[in-house]
Amino acid sequence: MTRHWSPLAAAMLGLLFLIGCATMVEMGTTAGYEAGVITKQEKEYYDRRALETESAVRPMNDREEYYVGRAVAATVLGSYRLYQDDRLTRYVNEVGQAVALSSDRPLTYRGYHFAVLDSDEVNALACPGGTILITRGMINRARNEEELAAILAHEVAHVNHKDGVNAIQRSRWVQAAASLGADAARQLGRGELDELASLFEGSVGDVVKTLVVNGYSRTQELAADRSAMIFMARVGYDPNALTDYLGRLAKEQGAGAHEGFFATHPGMAARLTEAQAFVSANNRWQRVNHQLRDQRFAAYRR
Amino acid sequence: MRGKCWLIVVGLVLVASVAMAASVKVVTQQAAIRQDKRFFAPVVATVPYGGVMQTLAREGDWLRVQYGGAQGWIHVSAVEEQKLELSSLMKAKARETSQDEVALAGKGFTPEVEKAFRAKNPQMKYDLVDRIETYRVPQEDLQVFVKDGWLREPGGAS
């Protein structure tokens, strides 16, 4: 005969399910079983459900995101040459670190790294985990350090929001994270490792396709613009530089530019309007004097 | 009688919650514990991936932690709440739990998966990715860069 849970106990278990902690559910059911309140079958049922609930929703962790990001970068670097200029690379990394450390997710598995791609095309790509690639063409269109910071802060925001890994088809991730039984996973067999490698390859493909072909959604771009301006303001860069830069890109797009960045970022004019509205709503963001930074930017610009 | 049993259950769960909230695990490859809650504060200890530490207090996005003999501040983005800590509370279960831990470690996208993927795709430019990951700005240099540019120290005030 099945015994009934007291309302309080049921509420507690429900809460534990909600917060997704299988270990705590198991503690509760063990105590319940030992006290004779629930049967062994009931205990097993609740334990299993808790574990399933937890594994079904397990988000990708920082280290997994890092490995996806490495593969994404390794793919993109198959189509671009790395620009080997130590001084410029160092400067881009200094500006990038200043905004990354001011972001909502300043630390990732192996941190943020910024690399320059040897291309006149306008483009910047954020690989999951924090490797950010920016073309010479994109840097050359910046008029000052504030604008370079704006581009990098926007890419850092995509990493903060996990937009890259969110492009991975959910079914792939669910399979990768939970398909292997607990017994089988103790020592991965050849077949299981191959299956995981295929799921990994598919996931990397999803991210690359979004970064290089489809682009993010308009909502994701707007969110990244807003976060970028907030990160910039925190460290002391002028957030207005983002709209200055976007304004010039919108003009180029209006004049017919359609490669790289322009292909994956349609509707720049509308995006500019939204970003400007965000600046107006934050009228504490006065124009700041950035003469010292302008000078050092000029020294790095070719 | 049943009411008493459930009081015990609820009590156990509460104890467990406190124990869980009181320790965190490092999710980055390495994490620095700093003397003060600022990114430019001196490092008092470095904790490897998976390292567990006790939390003593929280201020904004910084946690005051104890790791071995060292005490200091760590940024919340480098850690997650520790869940498997419970195994020590349930000694009889400890062995089983540690096996679960191994099982979980075998799933998802691990270094072994990257290795298998690279073996299948030897043309991938991992050498360049490795080089990019060596681009680091030493803390002292970044401090000078921020100061010279009249910027604010990142992660300081909030």
Image (spheres, coloured by chain):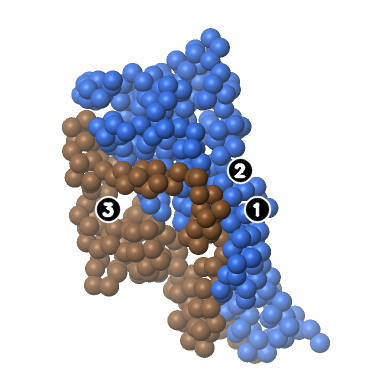
Chain colours: A blue, B brown
Output the chain of dot 3: B
A132 is higher (above) or lower (below) than B39: above
**Mark 2 highlights which residue?**
A206
Asked whether residue B137 is in view, the answer is yes
Q: Tell me where residue A30 appears, x and y as whole percent.
A: 61, 83
**Do tag 2 and tag 1 residues touch (Cβ < 8 Å)?**
yes
Residue shown at 53%/42% (left/top)?
A164
Give the label, 1 or 3, closer to the camera: 1
Q: Inspect the image, locate mark 1, and give the three-letter code of the amino acid beneath it.
A: Arg
Q: Residue beneath label 1, please?
A: A172
The residue at which mark 3 appears reads as: B37
Query: Within the image, what quadrant is residue A287 found in?
Result: top left
Q: Is mark 1 on a helix, strand or loop?
A: helix
* Residue B158, horizontal then vertical, whole percent: 33, 45
How far apart are the two marked residues, 2 and 1, measured between alpha carbons?
10 Å
Q: In the rendered structure, which amino acid carries the disc numbered 2? A: Asp
Q: In this view, does A61 lie above or below B17?
A: above
Q: Nearer the viewer, residue B98 or A258?
A: A258
* Vertical position of residue B82 compared to residue A260: above or below: below
SS at mark 2 in the image: helix
Nearer to me, A158 or B6 = A158
Foreground mark, 2 or 3, reads 2
